[in-house]
Image: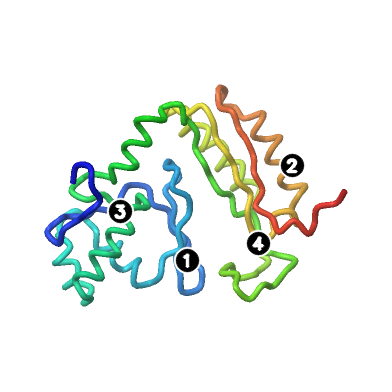
Amino acid sequence: MEGKYEIYVDDVPIAVDHIYKDKIDNFTLTCTPLSMNGIHLLTQGTLKILNQCNGRMPINEIAQSVQCDREYVKGVINSLWQIGLIKINGKLPMESQKENYTKPSIKQIDVWLHITNRCNFSCSYCYIKKTNEEMSRETAYLAIDNLAKSALLHGKSGVRLKFTGGEPLLRFSFIKDLVEYSKSCKYKGVNFTFHILTNGTLLSK
């Protein structure tokens, strides 16, 4: 596997630690908060294959277990490997290893806070099911505290919070409250920065 991205049917995949999952209709959102790989939307079939990556079965046995073509399963596992959700024979892709090695200055945790399911639009292509459910202030405070604690534990100097929804600007006062809370976090030495994923229609002059 040195210097190339080819995997084989006798390779043994295993899911990485700390994969967080959230079901959206017939899809599953996944992310690994301590990585820089972002959020990924998996189909039910892909999730089924991911769940079989337990470090005990090679790819050909996984294909038999999920009753799918071996080459198809190998392709899915290769994709999961490339985005950092699994390891092959205990290793991540060389690209990820090289990035971690050549960019030691990246000492930041990137986290998405889904603060509301509400939106001022109803776009047909959106995969978020619109409801009135919202993240509570207590949950958000706890998340911020734990993120700061984890950053210090893993030698990270920064946490970047990305506020998403729905449309997060429907809760602009809540966002401002979380920004102020982050700045006064009891875990000192962690620099918080902030982003908002918005459709922009609620921005005033």
Task: Give the number of the disc on residue 64.
Answer: none
State the image coordinates of residue 180 (x, y, percent, origin top left): 71, 35
Tell me whether the residue at label 2 lies in contact with that at label 1, contact meaning CB atoms closer than 8 angstroms.
no
Residue 170 lies left or right of residue 182; in this view the side is right
Residue at numbered disc 3: 81
In percent of the image, x 44 and y 65: which residue is there?
A: 28
Q: Earlier in the sequence, mark 2 or mark 3?
A: 3
Q: Earlier in the sequence, mark 1 or mark 4?
A: 1
Q: Earlier in the sequence, mark 4 or mark 2?
A: 4
Which marked residue is nearer to the observer: mark 1 or mark 3? Answer: 3
How far is the residue under mark 4 from the one under mark 3?
A: 29 Å
Residue extending furthest toward the top: 189
Residue 140 picture quarter: top right
Which secondary structure, mark 3? Answer: helix
Mark 4 crowd level (few <14, some 14–19, many ≥20, 10 Å Cα): many
How far is the residue under mark 1 from the one under mark 3?
A: 21 Å
Which secondary structure, mark 1? Answer: strand
Q: Earlier in the sequence, mark 1 or mark 3?
A: 1
How far is the residue under mark 1 from the one under mark 4?
A: 15 Å
Residue at numbered disc 1: 23
Q: Give amino acid for label 1.
A: Lys
Tell me whether the residue at label 4 lies in contact with that at label 3, contact meaning CB atoms closer than 8 angstroms.
no
Residue at numbered disc 4: 166
Q: Give amino acid for label 2.
A: Lys
Which marked residue is nearer to the observer: mark 1 or mark 4? Answer: 4
State the image coordinates of residue 205 (x, y, percent, origin top left): 87, 48
Mark 1 crowd level (few <14, some 14–19, many ≥20, 10 Å Cα): few
